[in-house]
Image: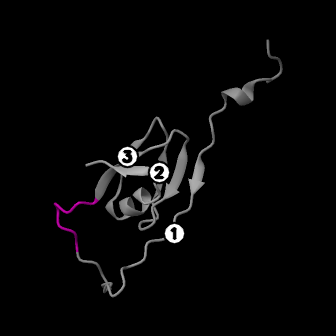
Amino acid sequence: MACCGQGRAALSPTPAVTLHLPAAEPAAGADVPAAAPRRAARELTSVRIRYTRERPVRVSGPASGRGYEFSGAAAVQSVDVRDAEGLVGTGLFRRIY
């Protein structure tokens, strides 16, 4: 029998790993407008990706800067379409079609 808090460490959740991805850069020769036009209502703004590991991870979207948290229990999530390619490129995620 454990006493005085012994064994609590075994019950605490595994801390998430934080990945820092490089910010996405505009393609060479791409013109960046001063003000982006309004998006069409049917334009794709998010996509679903699957985390391929079990250990919790926190990532920042390389294009949007938005924070995402994944784990084996929360493996499938919607992410900003601009972040998807960079996240999938790490090898830790797969795009769901």
Residue 28 falls inside the magenta stretch? no
Rounded to the nearest angstrom, the CA distance separating label 2 from label 3 is 13 Å
Amino acid beneath label 1: Pro
Residue 41 shown in magenta: yes
Residue 75 % position (x, y):
42, 41
Q: Amino acid at mark 2?
A: Leu
Residue 41 at x, y = what percent? 17, 62
| Residue at the image position 53 percent from the left and 51 percent from the top | 58
N-term-proximal mark, 2 vs 3: 3
Q: Is residue 41 left or right of residue 72?
A: left
Q: Which residues are magenta?
A: 38-45
In this rendering, the label closer to the viewer, 1 or 2 = 2
Q: What kind of element bears circle 1? A: loop
In percent of width and height, residue 21 lies at 52, 64
Label 2 SS: loop
Residue at image point 32% right, 84% down = 30
Residue beneath label 3, please? 77
Q: Which residue appears farthest toward the right when viewing the image?
A: 4
Can you identify the residue that label 2 sits on? 92
Calculate the distance from the C-alpha at mark 1 to the C-alpha at mark 2. 15 Å
Which mark identifies residue 22?
1
What colour scheme was applied to this rendering of the protein? Answer: one colour
**Type of amino acid under label 3:** Gln
Across and down, in percent, residue 48 comes to 32, 49
In this image, 21 relative to 33: left or right?
Answer: right
Give the CA distance from mark 3 to mark 1. Answer: 21 Å
Q: Relative to 54, is 47 above or below?
A: below
Tell me if mark 2 has few (under 14), some (14-19) or many (20+) residues whose alpha carbon lies within 10 angstroms of its own. Answer: few
